[in-house]
Amino acid sequence: MIVKKILFTMLAVLMLGIITACSSAGSESKNNAEESQESNGGEQIASSDEALIVYTNSASNGRGDWLKEKAGEVGFNLEIVEMGGSDLFNRLLAEKNNPIADVTFGMSQMDWQTLKQEEALVAYEPSWIDEIPDGSSDSDNFYHPIAEQRIIMLYNQDTYDETTAPQDWPDLWENEEFHGLYHVPSTLSGGTDRAVIYNILTRHLDENGELGVSDEGWAAVQAYIENGYTTPDGEDRIANLADGTIPISFYYSSGIPGIEEEFSFEAGIVSPEIGVPATVEQVGIMNHGDGQDYTLAHEFIDWFGSAEIQGEWANNFGSLPVNKLAVDQATDRMKEIGQSTSVQEIDYDLVGKYIDEWVEKIELEIY
Amino acid sequence: MSRLKPQKLNQRNKAHNPKRILLPFVYLAIAWFIIAFLIVPNINILMSTFLKDGSFSFDSIEKILSSERAMDSLKNSFILAFSLAITSNIVGIFLVLCTDYFDIKGAKILRIGYSTTLVFGGIILANGYLFIYGKNGFITNVLTSIFPNFNEEWFIGYPAVLFMMTFACTSLHMIFLRGALSNVDYQTVEAAKNMGASPFYIIRKIVLPSLLPVLFTLTILLFQTGLGAMSGPLIVGGENFQTISPMILTFSQRPASRDLAALLSIILGIVQLILLFMVMKAEKKTNYISGSKVKMKLKKQKINHPVGNAMMHIVAWGLFVIYTVPVIIVLIFSFTDSYSISTGTLSLSSFTLENYLSILTDSASYRPFLTSVIYAGLASIIVVIAMLFIARMIQKYRNRLTTIMELLLYIPWLLPGLLFALGLIITYDQPTWLMFNNVLTGTTVIMLIAYIIVNIPFTLRVIKSAYYSFDESLEEAARNLGANGFYTFIRVILPIVLPAALAVFALNFNGHLSDYDLSVFLYHPLFQPLGVVIYSATDANATADAKAISMVYSVILMAINAIVLYFVYGRGNKINTAL
């Protein structure tokens, strides 16, 4: 009886496997057929319909699907693999001897710097190099900027107005009326959360201090964390911001329109005089060795970074494109954010050198 | 001594058996597997974490020792592990007594309620508790309306974590302890009763001792769960009761801090191994004899004392409420919009089917389900079959070699999944002789291998206990009747251990179905597993109704888990899963 049952269960799983394999293969070929029919209309850019595997941390909210479809129209067969920023970085490092991705876009300039040092990238000069500001690319052409993410302090406009809201980060801990009313991340693994930390620490650089930061700098970070509200897992910090429970928070710029729509509110934007930290998402090609044909990857990058695509992307998903010819197409809210804040001057080489140690020290000693 | 005799006999019988010639090859294969998958990748990742600029660096030890937070978290993890092993066992035993030993009204419904934790666990469960006891939770709101001064942040800290995890961790009791209870000999219980023993005396002196082997294993697993607690402390632990696992996870995600992660997990792992070793010793000394050879099925005991009876019913049904309300709340909230979910408020207008529609009508969304079902199914079947074989070897050939083999197979309990996954990637990203010049990184096989490996310790533990729990006299009887080894195994031994094997299959399967930690580094880009898809849909940086979508995924996962359990246990099959 029991033996029969286990045989049955195994058989069921096996059948399921076969059915899946068949049905997914079937639907795939159908999809391909549809795609190729559709794409007959568009101009073909891709020289081959081989799959191009693209890793990114910047494909959520339908951006990945949009890109795949858009690229399909000009003949690219994209396979987009999406994961969080730190997972993506870890995976790329782990796979460097045998990379799976052809192209990666997203992350921050510091991650790309490491990948370059680890020889995980190959250099390429894209066709749109003249359309981005001079000196914004990697000097050896291993990676190129795509979009800028500003890290912006937000407040609830029912609680504060422009004058009563904090004017800069130090207000949060120096001014007691904000104590307990601003969000502090519970971990520092995300790029946005880290930006807040280096935004504070780089104001107190001191060659003789611990890890290049003066005692005041460390005291400031400690005060920032201790006087804020560390949002626990399971609680939504944006909901807290929207309903005024914890009326001060921060977010990355291109995500702001999304959260405003989701919680139907408009966040107040803090624009410190010193500027706001900005991370820059980049695009680059993974190093598959000298024998590899990189033509398709080159064609994709030329297409993806072009003013047309970056402009549409910005228009649809609210990013701040680096391509000068695409900036105009950013949404009004993005332009507003872009204009009302300026970019803080930060020595990213130095941040890149220390950030891991800074975060580790904070996690061990301050939290 | 009596145990050794038949074994020697067997060996003599088998001298001319072709299987004897195969045995060295089997050992060789197992040795290769252990070296290639359990030892080399782990050593590689440990080397790469502790080896800095060509020399070993042990800064990490000093860093950990001087970090107040790390030491506090370690302490809290141990406190939780010890207390959870006690409280969860108490509750678990009580549950099983309610459903299967005492005559309680509505025991079948109680059993369903108590079993909800089998399909409803981890972060989903923690969120469910938050919906009830949290700041805006249901009970909290009721309490604040009665007592205006009531502190709405009452459900936080050590008591909250312990409360939540105590109930969450009884799922294994509901499977294995119930099975063991049904093996308690009814005649012994009756005899004691006739001699005037009180119900509690009988439980203490007859029922519990025969459950002891199972309780051993459950205690190890509970201790381990407490030590590795993640979502519970993160969600309701508050600032004063954080544990070590979240810290290990953050450290292991950052290459520069991996030495800290490795060090902390090694500390936890060593403690677990010590406990395991102690239990293995104790097991060797214990003889599991369960009453008479002619067992009679247990009949439910009536509680004659009216007050005692009423009390039992009240507590039993009170527990039922504690178990079921979070599930019901999650079910209800999965039909509401994200605003209701994040604020914990309910109104008629917030009900929507959109969350379900957006997932179920997305043509791309069924593929991750199938990918995960196939991976989880294959891995669970392979590991169960392999461990049925290996555990049998360990039982039959008790020698130093098999003891070492057993200990080595517990290695996956030592390191967190993430480090182990990275170890696999960096070891097999180029052809090595150990893998017969194959590259594993980037193939579809590597995740399957990882899924199999992480289940080895638990599966081996459960199946080994199952082998030990059966009456060896049955095997002897079969032999004496002339049955050969293989026939005896298939017809006599296998049917007895199969329930445990099936149960562990279901648990492994359900565990893998939404796995993220391991999968995120290992999955093949063309076959995204469910956990990865859920994560990218619910990532803190994804805006659109992420919470609502994660709720819906949770409910769908619960449904799949329930179906799997139904296949194993349902349809009126009376499977007794004894360890």
Image: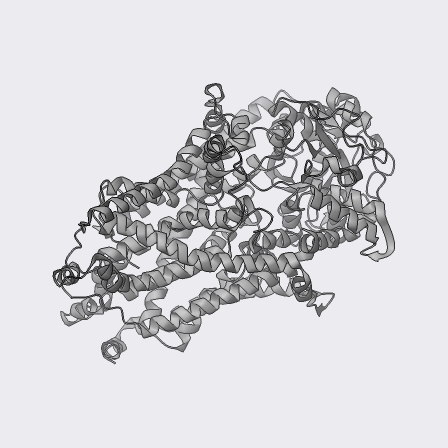
Above or below, B270 relative to B160:
below
Looking at the picture, how far across and down is residue B275, in whole percent? Answer: 45, 67
Question: In the depicted view, which residue is nearer to us: B240 or B408?
Answer: B240
Above or below, A139 relative to A266:
below
Above or below, A169 relative to B510:
above
Tell me if residue A268 can be seen: yes
Question: In the depicted view, which residue is nearer to us: A162 or B397?
Answer: A162
Relative to B75, B325 lies left or right: left
Identify the residue shown where x is 47% and y is 34%.
B143
Identify the residue shown where x is 69% and y is 44%.
A293
Image quadrant assignment for residue B70: bottom right
Relative to B23, B3 lies left or right: left
| Image colouring | one colour
Identify the residue shown where x is 48% and y is 42%.
B126
Q: Going by the picture, which residue comes out furthest to the left?
A: B194
Looking at the picture, how far across and down is residue A229, in whole percent? Answer: 66, 40
Looking at the picture, how far across and down is residue B507, in whole percent? Answer: 38, 50
Q: How many marks?
A: 0
Tell me if residue B387 can be seen: no
Question: In the depicted view, which residue is nearer to us: B257 or B423?
Answer: B257
Question: In the depicted view, which residue is nearer to us: B252 or B79?
Answer: B79
Looking at the picture, how far across and down is residue A53, in whole percent? Answer: 62, 40
Relative to B211, B43 lies left or right: right
